[in-house]
Image (cartoon, rainbow, N blue to C red):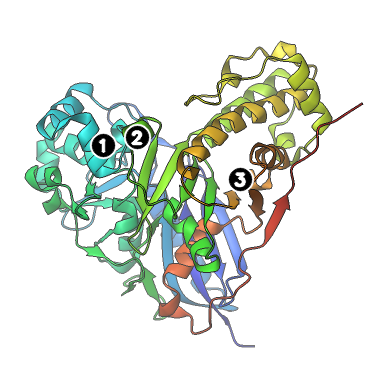
Amino acid sequence: MKPTPVIAVFDVGKTNKKLFLFDEHYQIVYERSARFIETIDEDGFSCENLESLRLSIFDSLSAIFRLKEFVVKAVNFSAYGASLVYVDEEGKPLTPLYNYLKPYPEELSKQLYAKYGGEDQFASETASPILGSLNSGLQLYRLKIEQPEIFKKLKYALHLPQYLSSLISGQYCSDITSIGCHTALWDFNSNRYHEWVEKEGLSLKLPPIKEPDECLKAVFPGNGYCVGIGLHDSSAALIPYLVSFNEPFILVSTGTWCISMNPFNLTPLTQSELQNDCLCYLQYQGKPVKASRLFAGNEHEQQVKRIADHFNQDAIKFRTMPFDPEVINKLQQSIQQNKHSDAFLKDSVFKERDLTIFSDEIEAYHQLIIDLIHQQVYSTRLVLKGTFVKRIFVDGGFSKNSVYMSLLANAFPDIEVFAASMAQATALGAALAIHKSWNNKPIPGDIIELKYYAQSKPVTK
């Protein structure tokens, strides 16, 4: 029997690191996942274990090359953004992979914004809210100021997807989807690096930009496969939808972050939107995508632990908890609900709720999702307004959560809300980005299976 031609995609999230093999019909035929214990940087702040990640990539590739039932035609990567790997002439990292949640020195950012028109102008031109270390361009600026000796040794600053690609291709490049994700590096008005990047000498440390559909020759031992340059995970998650649907839609990509992306909203970012954590991404075809962000996946994880501990339950129970409209009805009548859905909240009000007011973990969990949906509705509406969107697609972790999906459908009665059963949109997008380099078959028309969530009727007794 002939081996099945496949593409291998490494999908590197903040929590989970996954490897998928897709066949020529974009069906997953193999997968494995790993988690690594974080390490710390020189300041004692937690960060990704870059060496473990590097070795895992090599070990995983070697393992799949030994599988006789598959022949790997290509490899690509998707990974979280706002993370730079600083490599020397030999491609070896010079520093830890600094955590994008690490506090940024206020004086340093003030100094930068003052030189280039102030916070509002800077944020508007770069389509990046003022986010400290989450603006990865500011991480590179910090390295230049605080560690000048390291900066001198620096050959290239690589976003994480491109660093992973370089491990296999031996080539260094930049990618528009990684540059265009709240990095503060890109001028969205002139469609080039912002002037501050040039004037501060940072552009010399950024490798040439290559197209996201480009495939490079591999140097890692294998069988003549090619290597994609890697993509930012949120932009990769959008690709399957862009190739499958022409009518205007919003994609809510859920994971650690819940990101609402509207590729059909072409209006410039307002100061109000920037202050409410809106930004623009550059999708793989180079067009801007207006997006809003919420740290809801992270908060969900923390609050589930709190609920589980309080009620002496296993946290796994909450992964498959069914939606109960009677519980929702009771909570809405007996517990004060958040009435401020017309205001942006970075944290849900659930953090402040006393768990003793709930009779059991089911009530507590439903209230958590009610509070998260209040935030999600406001966040999604920021990119919805002014467009004729009739569909919302949800992928990632929350797409499998019936409580979340049912409440989201209730919140948008005039829009069709769907869960994408293809929950690996990020990895699939990275595979589709280099389709022409490894796959002679046409892209299937049914790569996304959708589950429709109707608005549930109020419970009456």
Picture coordinates of residue 152 (x, y %)? 9, 45
Side (left or right) of 162 relative to 294: left
Q: In whole angstroms, how far apart are the C-alphas of marks 2 and 1?
A: 7 Å
Which label was assigned to residue 15?
A: none
Q: Which residue is most to the right?
A: 461
| Front residue of 348 and 218 | 348
Verify CB contact (< 8 Å) between mark 3 and mark 2. Answer: no
Residue at disc 2, secondary structure: helix
Q: Nearer the viewer, mark 3 or mark 1?
A: 1
Verify CB contact (< 8 Å) between mark 3 and mark 1. Answer: no
Q: In whole angstroms, how far apart are the C-alphas of marks 3 and 1?
A: 30 Å
Q: Amino acid at mark 3?
A: Gly
Is residue 238 at all visible to an observer of this figure? yes
User: Circle 1 is placed at which residue position?
Assistant: 123
Residue at disc 1, secondary structure: helix
| Front residue of 18 and 235 | 235
Q: Quadrant of the C terminus?
A: top right
Question: As displayed, is residue 210 above or below residue 127?
Answer: below
Picture coordinates of residue 204 (x, y %)? 11, 53
Q: Amino acid at mark 2?
A: Leu
The earlier-in-sequence mark between 3 and 2 is 2
Q: Amino acid at mark 1?
A: Ala
